[in-house]
Amino acid sequence: MADVTGTFAAKRLRFVWFTLSYLIWTICRFARYEPSFDVRGKYHRYTEGARHAGDRLLAVCRVALVMVVGLALLPLWLANLAVAGIVTALAIGKIPRWYFRTAMAPAKSIVRAVARLWGVGTANGSESPDDLAVSFEEAFPDRPDQLQASDIDVYAPVLPLFKELFSCYDIVEAYATCPIYPLLAGKRPYIAYEHGTIRDIPFEATPAGRTTAISYRLADYSFVTNPDCIEAARKLQLKEFCYVPHVIDRKYHQEVPATARKPIVFCPARHDWRDKGSDQVIRGFAEFAREADEFRLVMTNWGQDLDRSRQLIDELGIADRVQLIEPLPVIKMIRLIGESRILVDQFSGNCGGIAPAALSVGTPLVIHLDLSKYEWCWTQPPPYYDATDAGEICQALHAALTCNMDELRDKARIWVQENYWYKQVVREHLRVYDHLLRRD
């Protein structure tokens, strides 16, 4: 009898010690104001945590009650290991990675099970920052930058509003870097819609990079609108995904008589010499302009290399043949594309939204495409003139100038309807919605 009593006493002491350690660590974490870098580039401190300190402390106490029961199922070695992890976290200011792998993950699984039975836990099944940190560690164990509580805390003030909003819908589809909202709100199923988002952002060692990576990785489904992002989708190991093109709806399809076209080479891409090849466009046009006296190059006056482009235009002596305009809203841009004789896009191998817009109105397109990135989603390559440098751009401009415009327009329209038509976007959305609702 004495042995049994001693065992029970030891267990009670273990529970109290573990729970108090957890409470101390949690209160310290919630009380610590951590600086973060916001979108305006200024450092600020999260004061919202202090505003809701009372609610958070109450939540911690509720969790502690659940832990007392849940920890009864833990073996002694695991409880002691978890306590060691908490003590280490208090000493060094962060949770050691071995703590997640060997102690916290199995402990939390047991505690969550008890919490579900008692109806205790975060609303709508939403995950806490610690839960997401564990999920991130499991999903991306080789990343040197791991998800931090400060990456998630910034969303806390608005989460109640999003939870209430999301509860009105069967499915939530989140755009760009916003899938973190339904993930944190515990909304299922949710769809992540990328528009080039996953090409670079999820792999950056930034808060936005980490939250984007985990929100796409845990999404129930993802729409990939940029075919070249297939490699990023595979690297992130998305659960399920499919290709959905940029929406090319009826406003793109404007009949433009050949007589209405002007001697304009239009290049709406931003000035980015490395990613867009803007310098090659200027050099190629300068060579083309020697034989095409009536043509002028129209470019937008934005981009990180705008000043370098201005200088290059002056050096080549074509300032009177180049016009820089403000970036245009989509309707006006489509109208100018339709009025132009040739559209020059980018030369990095990628296809964005400009190229399909040119094809939809039958304007000859000069671009470089890495077709190996597009075989998985296009029925066939579009009609275009390929070029990679200034000399090839000049040759492509001459070829586009002598093409049969009516024949090109017909081929381009067929390709757009097969690969970029708005009905395809609607059809894929309905298919995925039906799939997710039937699955759940």
Image (cartoon, grey):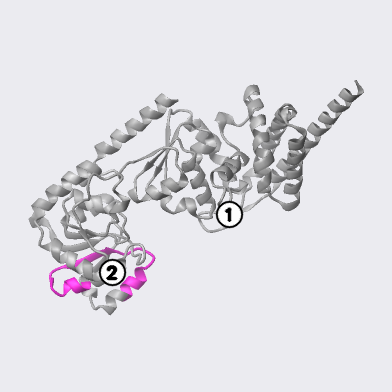
Query: Which residue position holds label 1?
Result: 144
What percent of the width, then of the height, locates residue 273?
Answer: 35, 67
Q: Is residue 264 left or right of residue 376?
A: left
Q: Amino acid at mark 1?
A: Pro
What percent of the width, then of the height, locates residue 390?
Answer: 25, 70
Locate the N terminus by quadrant. Answer: top right
Q: Which mark is residue 392?
A: none
179 or 104, nearer to the observer: 104
Whether 39 is among the magenta residues is no
Which picture quadrant has residue 370? bottom left
Q: Residue at x 18, y 53 (%)?
A: 383
Q: Is residue 127 left or right of residue 98?
A: left
Outermost top residue: 1
Kindly state the secondary structure of the residue where label 1 is placed.
Answer: loop
Which picture quadrant has residue 385? bottom left
Q: Amino acid at mark 2?
A: Gln
Quick one: label 2, few (<14), some, or many (20+) residues within 10 Å? Answer: many
Q: Residue at x 56, y 30 (%)?
A: 125
How far apart are labels 1 and 2 at the CA level?
37 Å
Magenta region: 286-311
What percent of the width, then of the height, locates residue 381?
Answer: 22, 50
What percent of the width, then of the height, locates residue 268?
Answer: 27, 59
Query: Which residue position holds label 2?
Result: 280
Q: Which comes before the other along the chain, label 1 or label 2?
A: 1
